[in-house]
Image (spheres, rainbow, N blue to C red):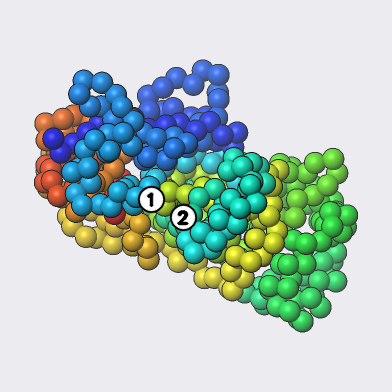
């Protein structure tokens, strides 16, 4: 066989939306529970299942018994299927975070193992020895924070927000690195002094719009203020690039680049890892020394990925890592295309219906194609079929 049906794993995180994923998967969500992410991969926290021998088995077990499907891929835990394909529905903003390089992850993991910190402990920073680069493509308008703005733009915020004027000397003496270090290491009382007047000013406004940084700062105040204390991640909302992606546009986030998803639905493809260093907008543990040791504070000009045509009806979103490739296929009514991936590939159909080697698939269904096998895809509907594929 060349094609195998997959069933992914839903993650019901509190920040998730209530409609997009249930609608895509054809499931009633009568209790309006949050459906945040749909995972397709071999990650131990949510491995996909594959139809095989008349039943269902986990995708990791299937690949162990059918290594030929991978066509020559290495058999280590990260390289067997080194990526995780997701659909995310972000209703409320996620934490500011960044991911380490593989080398730093290996060092940090061994250090925490030596210290005897349980791998699931909330204060553990390195859950594995892998890096976690990510590429995402928006399925709706999608808002995110992505890397630091220029020092000049950041200095302007210190001029415009009176309570932050005392930080101008820090920026002038030590640059953005010193400024970020100062607010991340400051005691909570000092953070409240810096952010309190901003809270009061934004509380008076009823005209905030998504295009304004202040809008997202107010969202953070409402979401993360606890017992009168403010989240220091609000500084980053002003100091990071605010990016709006339109449907079909993507962005890549490599090691050390701080970012945060704010709102929208996307396809995300990432390396298999749980290594996350948080920088605010979260009640979870923030490992400030590790964060500061890994963060890139250089100014970033966001590079929006439009997709590059690699075949008829097929676009790729290029990434500078070998762990994965993300492809978008748009197949017109009645059209047939032939595809062959060098190694195994996971696909999810977002709209329409098609046949693959005489197997019929509808929107919301997923499948894996074996490596080096030629398959014929045919659109059965009257509308364009949209299919995302992840391979390596």
Which residue is found at the position 42% from the left and 55% from the top?
135
The CA span between labels 2 and 1 is 7 Å
The quarter of the rendered structure image containing the C terminus is bottom left
| Residue 274 badge | none
Q: Position of residue 272 (x, y in %)?
A: 43, 48
Q: Does residue 221 show up?
A: yes
Residue 133 picture quarter: bottom left
- Left or right of 194? Residue 9 is left
Q: Position of residue 58 (x, y in %)?
A: 34, 30
Which residue is found at the position 25% from the left and 27% from the top?
51
Residue closest to the eye, 292 or 362:
292
SS state under label 1: loop
Q: Are marks 2 and 1 in contact (CB under 8 Å)?
A: yes
Q: Position of residue 61 (x, y in %)?
A: 31, 33
- Left or right of 190? Residue 158 is left
| Residue 78 badge | 1
Q: Earlier in the sequence, mark 2 or mark 1?
A: 1
The quarter of the rendered structure image containing the N terminus is top left
Q: Does residue 364 show up?
A: no
Residue 239 picture quarter: bottom right
Q: Quick check: 327 above or below 64?
A: below
Residue closest to the eye, 153 or 341:
341
Pointer 2: what residue? 130
Residue 8 picture quarter: top left
Residue closest to the eye, 273 or 188:
273
SS state under label 2: loop
Other-residue count near label 1 (Cα within 10 Å), few / some / many at <14 / 14–19 / ≥20: some
Q: Position of residue 189 (x, y in %)?
A: 88, 54
Residue closest to the eye, 233 or 370:
370
């Amino acid at each position: 066989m060349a094609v195998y049906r997959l069933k992914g794993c839903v993650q019901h995180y509190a920040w998730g939306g209530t409609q997009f994923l249930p609608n895509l998967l054809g499931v009633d969500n009568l209790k309006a529970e949050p459906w945040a992410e749909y995972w397709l991969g071999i990650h131990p926290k949510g491995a996909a299942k594959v139809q095989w021998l008349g039943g269902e088995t986990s995708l990791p077990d299937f690949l162990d018994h059918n290594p030929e499907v991978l066509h020559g891929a290495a058999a280590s835990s990260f390289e067997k299927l080194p990526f995780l394909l997701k659909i995310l529905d972000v209703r409320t903003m996620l934490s500011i975070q960044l991911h380490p390089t593989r080398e730093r992850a290996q060092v940090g993991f061994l250090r925490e193992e030596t210290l005897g910190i349980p791998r699931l402990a909330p204060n553990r920073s390195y859950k594995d020895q892998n890096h976690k680069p990510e590429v995402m493509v928006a399925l709706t308008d999608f808002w995110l924070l992505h890397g630091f703005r220029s020092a000049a733009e950041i200095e302007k915020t210190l001029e415009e927000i009176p309570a932050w004027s005392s930080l101008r000397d820090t920026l002038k003496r030590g640059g953005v690195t010193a400024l970020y270090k100062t607010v991340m290491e400051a005691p909570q009382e000092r953070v409240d002094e810096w952010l309190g007047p901003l809270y009061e000013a934004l509380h008076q406004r009823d005209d905030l719009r998504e295009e304004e940084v202040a809008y997202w700062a107010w969202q953070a105040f409402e979401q993360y203020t606890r017992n009168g204390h403010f989240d220091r991640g609000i500084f980053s909302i002003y100091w990071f690039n605010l990016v709006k992606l339109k449907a079909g546009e993507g962005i890549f986030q490599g090691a050390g680049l701080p970012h945060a998803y704010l709102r929208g639905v996307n396809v995300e493809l990432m390396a298999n890892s749980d290594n996350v260093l948080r920088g605010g907008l979260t009640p979870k543990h923030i490992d400030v020394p590790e964060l500061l040791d890994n963060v890139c504070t250089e100014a970033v000009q966001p590079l929006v990925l439009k997709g590059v045509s690699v075949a008829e009806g097929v676009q790729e979103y290029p990434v500078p890592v070998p762990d994965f490739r993300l492809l978008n296929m748009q197949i017109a009514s009645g059209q047939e295309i032939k595809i062959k991936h060098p190694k195994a590939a996971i696909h999810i159909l977002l709209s329409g219906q098609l046949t693959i080697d005489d197997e019929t698939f509808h929107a919301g269904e997923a499948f894996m194609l074996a490596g080096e096998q030629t398959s014929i895809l045919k659109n059965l509907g009257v509308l364009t079929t949209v299919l995302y594929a992840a391979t390596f």
